Image: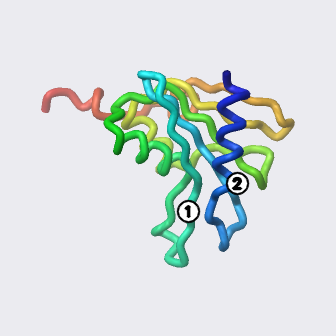
Amino acid sequence: MNEELYDKARDAAANAYAPYSNFHVGAVVVADDGRVFEGCNVENAAYGSGICAEGNAISSAAASGVRKIDTVVIACLDAGECYPCGNCRQLMREFSVDTVVVQDGSGALRVHSFDEILPHSFGPDSLGDG
């Protein structure tokens, strides 16, 4: 199933709006209920106003009521490897992502547990009752 999801992520990457970096990234998230959401990076001349593909897909899922995401699959048309940035890793943590799939430099899909991507992280379930 990772190959199929990776193909969807590549399709999303083809829709990226990346006129400044020419770095086209797509992401697919699979919610705990099996629904699938896609996103791509959207750049802006005010660089900090852009959104990463992962954040776009997660935001779409959240807007549909998703609060738990099982898997995030990331594809980049312009590089062999495409790992999520720190901001996206923390966003993934917020939605309790279990698995992250990326393509490595050899072209093989690599499946990572979320703890490999962001070890020793904290999120809403680790804050306690206050």
- Relative to the observer, which residue lies in front, 26 or 123? 26
Q: What residue is rendered at 65% in x and 41% in y?
A: 9
Q: Which residue is mark 1?
A: 42
Query: Which residue is outermost to the bottom?
Result: 45
Q: Give the alpha-carbon distance from disc 1 to disc 2, as whole Å.
A: 12 Å
Tell me where residue 96 appears, x and y as whole percent: 40, 29
In the drawing, does residue 23 fall left or right of residue 118? right
Q: Quadrant of the N terminus?
A: top right
In the drawing, does residue 93 fall left or right of residue 75? left
Q: Which residue is mark 2?
A: 14
Q: What residue is rendered at 58% in x and 45% in y?
A: 84
Tell me where residue 126 appears, x and y as whole percent: 29, 28
Q: Secondary structure at mark 1?
A: loop
Q: Quadrant of the C terminus?
A: top left
- Relative to the observer, which residue lies in front, 110 or 8? 8
In the drawing, does residue 10 fall left or right of residue 41? right
The image quadrant that residue 66 belongs to is top left
- Relative to the observer, which residue lies in front, 18 or 129? 18
Tell me where residue 92 appears, x and y as whole percent: 45, 38
Q: Looking at the image, tell me whether mark 1 or mark 2 is earlier in sequence order.
A: 2
Amino acid type at image mark 1: Val
Query: Which residue is outermost to the left?
Result: 130
